[in-house]
Image (cartoon, rainbow, N blue to C red):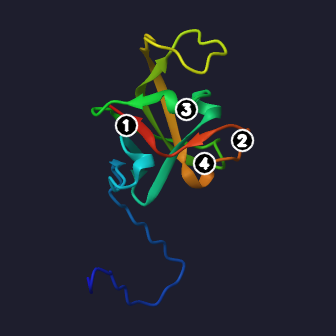
Amino acid sequence: MNKGYVSIKRRWGKDKVELLLSMPVLKMRANPNVREDEGRVAIQRGPVVYCLEEVDNGSNLNNIVLSKGSKFEVEYERDLLNGVCVIKAEAEREDYGPWGEELYKADVNVSYKPVSIKFIPYFAWANRAPGEMMVWVRVK
């Protein structure tokens, strides 16, 4: 190691170098002065930021809420976008019941329903179907 770098001095042939890195799933928070991201987290695994897409998680992605104790499961999906690691988790989706055309309502009973969600790498979004995408997800 030299200043954080590994130096390998050798004559290279048909060699193969395999690098294994610890890549835990992290819930990243923005600086509290970024008001648009307050109460939200971005999911990151190693250097890769992930996002939710409508094609996997349905519409109204803003209604998805992670709990503080959410568990994440990383899975490699060979057939998705030429092979990517996705992150699956359990969350809740807010349900406002029938709303109609009203812009505002008083005393709305909001319920929460469990939902399975899937994050894909941010670099891979918008390659399957039109729809919304979200990086910063609400958290309880």
Measure how far apart labels 2 and 1 are at the Cα level: 23 Å
Q: Tell me if label 4 and label 2 are in contact, CB under 8 Å.
A: no
Q: Position of residue 10 (x, y in %)?
A: 41, 89
Determine which residue is flagged by label 1.
Answer: 72
Q: Amino acid at mark 3?
A: Leu
Q: Quadrant of the C terminus?
A: top left
Judged left or right of residue 14, residue 54 is: right
Q: Amino acid at mark 2?
A: Arg
Say which label, 4 or 3, has the lower sequence index: 3
Q: Amino acid at mark 1?
A: Phe
Determine which residue is flagged by label 2.
Answer: 128
Measure how far apart labels 4 and 3 are at the Cα level: 24 Å
Determine which residue is flagged by label 3.
Answer: 61
* Nearer mark to the viewer, of 4 and 2: 2
Q: Tell me if label 1 and label 4 are in contact, CB under 8 Å.
A: no
Measure how far apart labels 4 and 2 are at the Cα level: 14 Å
